[in-house]
Each structure stands twice: as structure tokens, then as C-alpha cells.
Amino acid sequence: MMHPAEIEFLAENEIIQIVPTFNHASHVHLICGSYGPFRAGLPLNVPIWVALNLRQKKTCRILAPDWMTVDKLQERLEEEKASKFFTQLPTNYYLEITQMLLTVASEDIPQGNDIKTAVKDLWDLRIAKLRSSVDLFVKEGRVQASLNHLTPMEINSVRPVFPDTLDALMTLHEHINSSDDREDSSQSSGATPSSTSFSLSL
Amino acid sequence: MVGPGLVVQINESLFQGKRKYNRGRLRLGDRKPEERSDENEENSDEDEINMYRNIKPHYFSIDAIMAAQEKIQCSFIKKVEHVDFLDSIYSDKDEESDPKIELPLWMVKVFLVGKSIQFDMPKAYNEIYRGVLTADANVVDLFKLCKHFYLFGKFLSQLEHREAYEVRRTLIQTFIDRFKQTMDWAQNIDDNQPCFNRLDCLERLIFNDARVAQQHLNIYLTEGSGQMEIAAMILNYRKRKIHESRVLE
Amino acid sequence: MYCDKVVELLKELERSREDTIPPYNNDGINQVLSEMKTLDAEIIDFLRKQKDNLPLDAIRLRRAAIERNKRCLMTYIWTRLQRLKEMRWEIGAILPSDVRQNLSQSEIEWFNNYCKTLVSYMKTIGSDTGLNLTQDTKPPKSLYTEVRSLVDAGKLELESGEVLILRKNSQYMLSRSQAEPLIRQGILEQVRQ
């Protein structure tokens, strides 16, 4: 299981736009790439962790990503409601990015509170979907299921429960007493898997 | 693990008892049950740290040991000699009715080898309770019924008994039926002690997993990351100290 | 009935909280060991006396009881070691005095050896000074952090060589690596932004 802080750490590598208030003519060379030049007033792309550090020193303004507006998020929410499956989101880290930007740079993002609510609604909806998928998977004793477009944080929310649940089920299934293995038509149908896999893709 | 199109495999488990297609019938796994009974199971391939919190019964699992300690009412077909605590059941009245005695599961297993004993399915697994669980598993206080409901039930169903197969089927169905409820309870953090009390030991492990993850997420959402905290052990240790000193006063 | 004593030992362990270690029950363990010896002697006795017509059930039961006693004793010790190991990672090499009191001599020895092994392994990671694996188990957000002292903790030598005197309720700026163990031990508290 990963801690949310670790997933946030992964999210910090996503690229975001900032408007610096200082000048720095040469590129800054980092392990994750080279960024620059920094010119006061001119937007440029940097990883989120760079943006947050500069913002905390008040040497830049952060531009909210395109998807981070109340209208866009409402659209996503409606789309998610209408779809039976998980919809593809503009970023894999919507919850974490919102959380980080609103903590450090709330003044740079208009309607911060409404955005927070909208993101939480989207999260809740998708988690509810995920949980009912997992429940269905367990109930029907399926062999394989595959869910697309889940984000790491969402996967993490079922990560601790799911393997243990399958282990518990396996414990109950194995070494069944063969002497009572006899015909019984009233049993529930559906094949019990000899090998179960549940794949979630991003 | 990052990047589009990548597949994250959450788990792959091997189910020993396969069911034949559409017949839904459990048949024998590749291994014979008597080769390895998991009341004494050893997970030698698991590393220790994982094993400590492992949900599967293993050699050092206290839950599995305690489940094998649960009592079963049984009667002897043959007289067993040279076991002191059994002498009393013969001495009372000579073979008037078959004498009954409660023995822990692990002993019953021993006497079954020599076919010296027969037993009744304990209350929680008899036909009546199987009916109740099939009707609505979610309303049953499983912990009260039997603390180690699933493990004890599993061990029972591995013994020679005509109802063994039905017991196992009920266990599996009960677990599946209650799974959603266990998850839901774990998600709603506020005061779910009463709910928790109704779960059996196996369900409690799953509940705790889910709950810890939910707590981490809640703290992350309210307080953000990057905070360093006092070790939970020290914190609890202090709370206990304060509590103890209050009791002394 | 056989094995009652050893089950009592495990119950004692089960009842205690998972983040504590109850007193090592030497008496209990000795009683179980002597039960095992008695059972063993009885089996040998049966085999010696009765050449044919062996009381198979009685022998099987005794043997199962010996095995079960062994399993439970090992579980008792193993569970305690798991808790002890977790403490090393949670609070470090110095155990609270009442935990230490509850350990047996060989457990204390085991713990010291575990600490040694861990330290010498951590020294080998990386090229020069090694890597402290117990630190920064979550990604750090900054190099320095503001902390408040919760007790009059006395002198603290900083990595720079300066000496700081920690007074109750005073605030300091410390490097994260230096602050973290003290925060975990509850001597300092991180000031929330």
C-alpha cells in the first residue's frame, strides 16, 4: 500500500505553467529535465515541485491547469455520471494537484473553494463506482476484470482491501472436503476461478 | 507505475477448489486435502513481515491456533484408554446413553484418525443457522456467534462429516454477502465500534486494512502531506501512562 | 486438558495491545515445557510396556499435544519478536523502560543484534556515509522545519557543530533529518503552517 503522501510525490513531477517575477537567463538543469529561461512576466513550464517552491518564496504566480475551473470540472462530473465506465481524465493526479495548488497558491486560483468541492464530488463518484465494481467482482466470483482510466490514488484506495479479500476467499475455497463433493443442482452457477486477476489501468 | 496504458495488477490468487463450468460444483484441487491441512499451515514462501499481518492462516497465526481451540460436542464410538480427562465420561453411567463431551477441534481431529469419535456440527454451523445466514448474512452478529467463524468453519469442513460440504458453501456465501457491508463500515470512520463488534476475526482484518487507508486519506485531505508525527507507539504509551496515573489517584 | 496452559499464554498476548509487549511469562513457558516432557515420557512408557495392542489413540493424542505445544510456544516468541522489530522502526534503538523490563534476556540480546545488523546494513548503502532507512519514510517537503520543544530536553548538538539548548515551548528551526527522530520520540512537535 502506498501512502497518499507518496502518490502526491509522484504528482509533483507533472508539468504546470508559472509566471515568474524574476529573471534568470540560463536554463536550470535538473535530473528530471532542463527548465528556463525565466523571464519576469513570461509564462513557462516547470514541474509542480519547482512551481510550489518558487511560489512559497513568492517569486512566481501559478497558472491553474486548463481543467481546473468549476465549469470544466462540472462537465467532467456530468460525463462521469452518464458513463457506465470510468472516463479518462485530463490528469492522473486531479485530487493531489488540486490539494497542493490550493494549499500553497490559493490566491492564484479563482473560485478555489468551489473547485475543491467539485473535485471532491468527482472523487466520491468515481470511488463509489470503483467500490461497486469490486463488490460485483467478488459477488460474481469472476475470473478477470479490467478497469481503465483509474488514477493511482483511486487504485490505492482499494489496494489494501482487495488482495486480502481475495486471500480470504481463497482460504475459504481451498482444501475442500472431497468426500462431500457430490451433485447438487441448486448451487449457484458461475465458475469459480482457478486464478483470479483484477487489472486496473491508468 | 505511472503512465498511460500501463496495467497494474492488484492481485492474483490461486483458488484451490475449482468449480466445473456451469455446474458450479467444487471439485478436488490438485493437492489432496490430507497432504496439507492448513490448521498447521506453513507459508514458507512468504517473507516474515508480510506474514505477520497475513490474512491467510499460517503456522504462527494466533487466529488459526485459537480457531482450532474452539470446542465441539462429540461422543465416543470406541473407548479411549489411558487419557485421564476422558475417564470421567465412562465412569458415570455404564453405556446407558452415548456419553457426550466437549473437545477442542485439534483433539477431535486426532480421534477421527482412529475413527473413535463422532461429532455434531456446532450450533453456528448447523442447518438452522445455515438457513439464517443464507437468508440474510448481514444482520448476523458473527463475532457473537463464533469469534473465529470462518476459520473454525473451514477447519470443521475439512473433517469427516456429512454436512462438511454445505458448511463450506455457507462460509463462502456468507463472506461474499457481507463483504460490501464490511467495506462500507470501514469507509465511514465516525464511531463504528458497534459495527466492528459484529465482525468475525477474518473480517476484522479486512476492516482494519480499509480503515487505515481511509484514515491516511482523510488526514491527507485535511492536513496535507509533509507533516512529521509522533510515533503512534509513543503516543499510545503516553496515553496509557496518563490513564494509569489517574487510576492511581 | 492438554495444551490449556499454552493457550492461556497466547490469550495473554492476544489481549495486550499490538503496540506493547507484555511481561515475558517465564513460569508459564516452563510449565508448558514440563508438560511436553511428561507427555513424551508417557509415550515412551507406552511403547516400552505394551509390545502389542498399543493404545493408539492415547499415543496419537499425546503426540498431537506435544506438536501443538511447540507450535504455540514458537508463536508466542515469534509474535513478540515481530512487535519488537516494529518498535525498532517506529521509535528507534532506545526502547521505553517499561518495554525493556518486559523482555527476556534473549529478547534483549536479539534486539541488540537486530539493531547492529540494521545499522551495518544501512552503512553499506550508497558510496560514503550510508543511508538511514528509518528516516524520511514519507517524501520530505522541505529541508528545514520549524519545531517547538515540548519538554526541557537539554543540549542538542547540531550538524553544524553548534549546540542548542532545548527549552519547553520554545521554537527552533532545525534540519528535517535532525528533527524527525526527536519528533517521533515526542520531544519536539512540528509547527503547523
Image (tube, grey):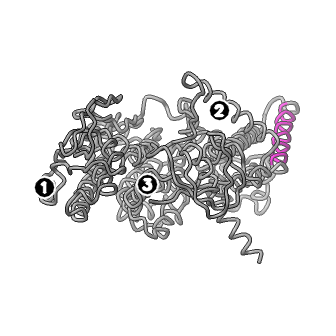
Residue C114 in the image: x percent, y percent? 69, 34
The quarter of the image holding the C terminus of chain B is bottom right
Q: Given the image, what chain letter belongs to the residue carrying mark 1?
A: A
Q: Is residue A12 above or below residue A139?
A: above
Q: Which of label 1 and label 2 is nearer to you?
A: 1
Residue B33 in the image: x percent, y percent? 51, 35
Q: Amino acid at mark 3?
A: His
State whether the magenta stretch is mostly helix, strand or loop: helix
Q: Say which quarter of the image contains residue A71.
A: bottom left
Q: Are marks 1 and 2 in contact (CB under 8 Å)?
A: no
Pick the residue in front: A49 or B70: A49
Tell me the element at label 2. helix
Instruction: Give the numbered dot on residue B216.
Output: 3
Instruction: Give the numbered dot on residue A138.
Output: none
Considering every residue shown, the one lying at the far bottom of the view is B249
Pick the residue in front: A34 or B169: A34
Q: Amino acid at mark 2?
A: Leu
Residue in the picture at 15% in, 51% down:
A84
* The magenta segment: C29-47
Tell me the element at label 3. helix
Pick the residue in front: B136 or C159: C159
In this figure, which residue is indicated by the disc labeled 2? C118
Q: Which of label 1 and label 3 is nearer to you?
A: 1
Instruction: Give the numbered dot on residue A72.
Output: 1
